[in-house]
Amino acid sequence: MNSFGTLFRITLWGESHGPQIGVTLDGVPAGLPLDIPDFEADLARRRSGAKGTTPRQENDLPQIVSGLYKGHTTGAPLTLVFENANTRSGDYDNLLTQPRPSHADRTAAVKFEGWNDPRGGGHFSGRLTLALVAAGVVAKKILGGATFSTRLTAVGGQTDPARFDDAIDDALRDEDSVGGIVECRVAGIPAGWGEPFFDSVESAAAHLLFAIPAIKGVEFGDGFAAAALRGSAHNDPIADADGRTATNHAGGIAGGITNGNELIVRAAVKPTASIAREQQTFDFAAGRVAPLRIRGRHDACIALRAAVVVEAAMAVALADFKLRDRCRRAAK
Amino acid sequence: MNSFGTLFRITLWGESHGPQIGVTLDGVPAGLPLDIPDFEADLARRRSGAKGTTPRQENDLPQIVSGLYKGHTTGAPLTLVFENANTRSGDYDNLLTQPRPSHADRTAAVKFEGWNDPRGGGHFSGRLTLALVAAGVVAKKILGGATFSTRLTAVGGQTDPARFDDAIDDALRDEDSVGGIVECRVAGIPAGWGEPFFDSVESAAAHLLFAIPAIKGVEFGDGFAAAALRGSAHNDPIADADGRTATNHAGGIAGGITNGNELIVRAAVKPTASIAREQQTFDFAAGRVAPLRIRGRHDACIALRAAVVVEAAMAVALADFKLRDRCRRAAK
Amino acid sequence: MNSFGTLFRITLWGESHGPQIGVTLDGVPAGLPLDIPDFEADLARRRSGAKGTTPRQENDLPQIVSGLYKGHTTGAPLTLVFENANTRSGDYDNLLTQPRPSHADRTAAVKFEGWNDPRGGGHFSGRLTLALVAAGVVAKKILGGATFSTRLTAVGGQTDPARFDDAIDDALRDEDSVGGIVECRVAGIPAGWGEPFFDSVESAAAHLLFAIPAIKGVEFGDGFAAAALRGSAHNDPIADADGRTATNHAGGIAGGITNGNELIVRAAVKPTASIAREQQTFDFAAGRVAPLRIRGRHDACIALRAAVVVEAAMAVALADFKLRDRCRRAAK
Amino acid sequence: MNSFGTLFRITLWGESHGPQIGVTLDGVPAGLPLDIPDFEADLARRRSGAKGTTPRQENDLPQIVSGLYKGHTTGAPLTLVFENANTRSGDYDNLLTQPRPSHADRTAAVKFEGWNDPRGGGHFSGRLTLALVAAGVVAKKILGGATFSTRLTAVGGQTDPARFDDAIDDALRDEDSVGGIVECRVAGIPAGWGEPFFDSVESAAAHLLFAIPAIKGVEFGDGFAAAALRGSAHNDPIADADGRTATNHAGGIAGGITNGNELIVRAAVKPTASIAREQQTFDFAAGRVAPLRIRGRHDACIALRAAVVVEAAMAVALADFKLRDRCRRAAK
């Protein structure tokens, strides 16, 4: 289903070329000040405009259509809506006959037996992450003191930030795309958030992160590198009475529960599936493999814009844990 | 909470040294033949006994205490119980004063304000994966035709299986442990399973996988390697009218939905946190860092036993999707 | 939370005097034809206009802002939105100092610590049932062959329909209101829907029915009258091989599961809490009981308009069970 | 599914004649003292032994098999198990060919396509309420100061308690059964518990109450009687600054949220479906209506034993709301 969360639950809807996309946030504590400008900074990070991102103008700001009164949240469901202006629908029927490789065109058509809205990827479009970023803004307000720092640690295989632009330039020149790795660090999360087993912090965060289109890998702390380490090198000895650890290979989570150290998560973003250069893929009308050229404006490196989406997903997951933690503590 | 799933929902409980651990499976279709020997093969894989695994004898088989009648599932909740025999409780109070590095000892105590059962890790023990493996056996019955093949692709940084033993031997000699990477492939899953966004196949699978103690990374298809690829290299062109793709960089999932190709998932297993060699970590009674030696029997490479747990988690996630998919198709 | 359902899940939001109210329907099967006129008949029944209903004009029709493409549902979340036009907000601050008796004014203020939107009852307004009725229209499409017949069986204590008007006239004359009882019968539901215990048909239906403002009692079949009967008089003997029962005291549900006979549910609707005549209630500003006159347009008998809301709630609950049932049967 | 609750979630399993029945309670706050004798009083109330109840001996006490350590809850899932001793399974195949009127025999067989455990009603047996009563004991501990008073207000149509025995005697003499009405009042619940719309207090409580076998009606406050009242007679004016109301027609709930007054709920219990006297019902083997005599030990008035079950269901629903309320308040 298109909902996620236990006490702070978000419900997402919309299509790339439908009238609007939106998100309903349930469980928002009453009395949080909220206004449209609060959304600007994070939405601008998603919008980008840098080299390697689509030149399409998206100056979106949400409308708040429920849950707000006199500039504060009311405790009732908060709904944020974005109009889809200036969509170029044109003719998308070719996506039904020759689905784009590594897109949802084909799987959506199989799942929904051809009834899916194919325009711009429909409900599977990356445009829906706009609503997720907006939800993240509210989640950060719930979190209060937490500090997020999010950056790309790799682009197209380059790990030196000075070379990121080159990797993108090369891909653009070749009408191609590149992937990247987003790292998000969250400071200020106290120990004790999360639940054993199925609602571990890693479980809930990964659940949300893998909902973001193009993400194919998630790791916490040392992640995959931990598999190559010895226990003596990977273990994080506790260093003081506050539970601070001398190292942080675990990325701030032990037994699925936060340990009071900085949270560290990385997400692997695959290269944009939409590339301008010609591809060979099956044409269901013709009954054979045929060349495909994808028209339109594309991101050469969607990872650039995914960074704030990863951050928003982390904020949403953590806000739910914060509310659940407060509950447990208060219940004494 | 300790439940997971929408139509096929599992609820897990128990502690390492409590009377028993168990799992209730709700939504099991009626009429599946089920008997104790069905569990033997997978439980034996978890039990191991190979070098690098704990020498403790766990000849566990479950009791089926509800949901079975005349050798078939009834459609009512199916409950599987494992007795905890021969536990060596002894004195665990030292875990409260000097929590083991990278264990849940400290986070559990913070979360539950000192009321958690510390014996053998209590509810956070890897022993609870016994119940998950048993749930996986039932899930595989629900899945019918799906075929699982699961193996280690790395141990202690070695990727050549011929060197796995060496890595473990070296760790054992040093009273240390090593991590590993588990790869699970599932054939026979049709296209169309999974839901857009929050219930993508990757989201649900990762949610369950990160519930397994020691797992710190999850990736599908090329995963983190995809971040270094170009779109032209990573895209999987469709090769025939059945949707088979010429390559499978996506690991059988596009837009969060299965595409009919083999599912490929990898999980990074950290080195066992319990090592015999001395560690320096905070002693809360003494108020300073002090040496710690962890007594008892430990796995030098828990990844060996985690393989079947990863497979079980995948089976549980997929069984839920199968039931949901059938529902959608039948609803026409 | 403001969501309900397992496979067919509705999420409701909005306030009486906010910009709009809406509902998102998740799990709608793809390919159902849907158009605005489909909503007219049921929305007209809720709108009423008969004596005893508010003279306010609500010519609302929904906008479909997601989940529809070329006149058919897509399988993605379907969102229906109603604009709140011509609201008379005025000054509602008096509701904070002197909450209306038997309204949510006081409880909402306590729960949300004064941050709730008080205008017209805010999120607690009966206006939100507009969205529930719209959801019911979609639910009936999912149900296909089911036939609903819903009527009032009592108004202000009168059980003879010929006297309903008199009861309302008398109340209007006295600036007062009256309650009523709604009976909803559903034919065409096959045997086998519902789940044992917590998801019995009665449980899910009552959950939704008690979400409707003003409903204070729910009964199935003979309901409270059954408590006065003997087993020999109440039991429904099976009459034929199709499971038809000679009588239907159970209202079509045995063991929480439909038995193939007509479903019968009744809901008690309390008299409208907003009455024009003067009431004595506590004034928190004055610190003492004081007279209160509620201004505005009110329904003398909200039960008249609640009938279609009850029907919609039943349709929503049953649509979820239909999807779940199909799943179970298909899973063989 | 067989789970209920958001933060305090119970999962129920078992069959009347299976090895055991049990309940897992998730979200129990850590540190509550708990011991077997705590369960005795409520289980004794369910056991009864009074005239009109089955003479079968059920001296059940639960085993606590998880979630308890050193006499206190640990915060991990708490599992309570009851062994099914001395069951008389005998031959239940006749229930498949001639299902008992108004039992789940037929609907369960349709739903589960003949795979259900028919012995003693299997999973649909009233015996499962044993686990619900045990869950209620823990819920009451979570609730702390709340006081429950529960009684029968009617038996077999008699509302004078002095005549209850006569009604039961008459039914016993006629090999018949009688229904009854249970009223549960809860004092000490503060204002502000519950959520608008789908998680109103009435919704959640009714959901659980209708899960109890034999309950066919639920009402709060004046309930169905409210439908016959005028607003001026039914409204509860607030009487003081604490929100106490001069009357309590609403049963302590306004807008789905507690208002600080006593909660009042009534549940209609149908007459026991199992009666000793001969009934005429369809015999699927013979293909015609035929006489049926139900052997075994039955309750002439199951309402006597249902009282504590109703109380337990209310306690479970309220405990979940308490945890959720604490969370919201603490989140400021």
Image: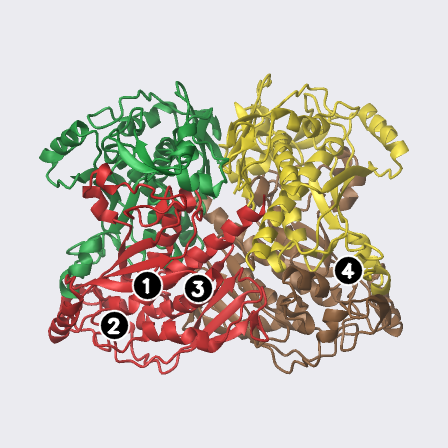
Chain colours: A green, B red, C yellow, D brown
Q: Please tell me how many numbered marks the rendered image carries.
A: 4
- In space, the residues marked 2 and 1 are separated at their CA atoms by 41 Å
Are circles 4 and 2 on residues that touch, CB within 8 Å? no
Report helix, strand or loop for mark 1: strand
Q: Nearer the viewer, mark 1 or mark 3?
A: 1
Q: To which quarter of the image does residue B262 belong?
A: bottom left
Mark nearer the N terminus (1 vs 3): 3
The residue identified by callout 1 is B149
Q: Position of residue A149 (x, y in %)?
A: 22, 38
Badge 1 vs badge 4, beta-carbon distance below 8 Å: no
Q: Amino acid at mark 1?
A: Ser
Q: Is residue D224 left or right of residue B88?
A: right
Say yes or no: labels 3 and 4 on the same chain: no
Other-residue count near label 2 (Cα within 10 Å), few / some / many at <14 / 14–19 / ≥20: some
Q: Which residue is mark 2?
A: B94
What's the mark number on residue D270? 4
Residue C294 in the image: state x and y as whole percent. 68, 24
Q: Are marks 1 and 3 on the same chain?
A: yes
Amino acid type at image mark 4: Lys
Query: Alpha-carbon neighbours of circle 4 within 10 Å: few (<14), some, or many (≥20)?
Result: many
- Please report whichever mark, 2 or 3, sits nearer to the chain's N-terminal start: 2
Q: Looking at the picture, which amino acid does disc 3 mark?
A: Lys
Describe the element under mark 3 as helix, strand or loop. Answer: helix
- Crowd class of label 3 (few under 14; some 14 to 19; many from 20; radius 10 Å): many
Mark 2–mark 3 CB contact (< 8 Å): no
Residue B103 in view (yes/no): no
